[in-house]
Image (tube, rainbow, N blue to C red):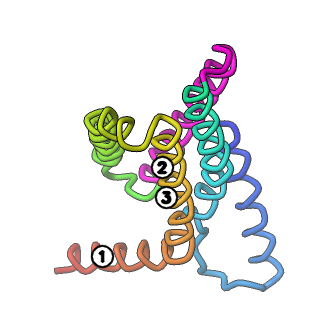
Amino acid sequence: SGRILDWVYRKEYVKFEDKKKAGLIGEYEKFNIVKSRVLVAVPYTIVTDGFTLMYGWCLAKKVHVSTVLVSEFLISNGCMALVGINTTLLIDLYASNSSDATSCVNLTRCLTGAIFVAALTSMNKSMTIGGTFTLMCALGLISGALLYIPLKFGMKWSAARDAREQRKRND
């Protein structure tokens, strides 16, 4: 995912510079780093959620182990890619506090994992294995849809944060 992140970043930056040269955007307009990172996360989210659904129902229907292992492999790769994308985005946004940003991603990842592991047995009993993984897939898709919020407002929030920090330095 790192190479894809870099490729999309370069592609988006070239588009941004071309628009600047053509006069379509202002000379002092800032590059939308959030867009260049979130665009990469969307396909990973969809593919990972699809294989999560496949994994759960393959376990429930007791299909051949190779299908379960392949889906598990692809889920793992997708999840690690998403962690990398989120970490990269937070480091880009909070470059002066990159260790704090990385810690937040890891803490969130661990807490989410712990919550689901704690609830997994109860969920499997009440919803079956297929239902549990269908719920996880739905939560993933909802999370993926929520990525459009920072796409729309991320640069405004970043500018407001920069203005607050500038005011603090001036005071």
- Which part of the image, by quadrant, shows the N terminus? top right
The secondary element bearing badge 2 is classed as: helix
Residue 81 among those drawn in magenta: yes
Indicate the quadrant where residue 145 lies: bottom right
Q: Which residues are magenta?
A: 62-91
From the top left corner, tell me how far across and down residue 166 is, in percent.
30, 76
Q: Mark 3 — residue?
A: 143
Reading the chain from its start, which is encountered first: label 1 or label 2? 2
From the top left corner, tell me how far across and down residue 123 is, in percent.
35, 41
Reading the chain from its start, which is encountered first: label 2 or label 3? 2
Residue at the left extreme? 171
Reading the chain from its start, which is encountered first: label 3 or label 1? 3
From the top left corner, tell me how far across and down residue 28 is, in percent.
59, 80
Residue at the top extreme? 65
Q: Nearer the viewer, residue 63 or 16?
A: 63
The residue at the point 28 percent across, 78 percent down is 164
Q: Nearer the viewer, residue 43 or 49?
A: 49
Looking at the image, is mark 1 or mark 2 nearer the viewer? 2
Q: Left or right: 94 with respect to 167?
A: right
- Give the residue type that dot 1 points to: Gln
Q: Is residue 9 above or below residue 107?
A: below
From the top left corner, tell me how far across and down residue 83 is, in percent.
48, 40
The residue at the point 50 percent across, 66 percent down is 146
Q: Residues within 10 Å of mark 2 (few under 14, many from 20)?
A: some
Indicate the quadrant where residue 27 lies: bottom right
Q: Left or right: 157 with respect to 100?
A: right
Q: Mark 1 — residue?
A: 166
- Give the residue type that dot 3 points to: Ser
Q: Mark 2 — residue?
A: 135
Q: How many numbered marks appear?
A: 3
Q: Is residue 68 above or below residue 125?
A: above
Q: Is residue 95 above or below residue 119?
A: below
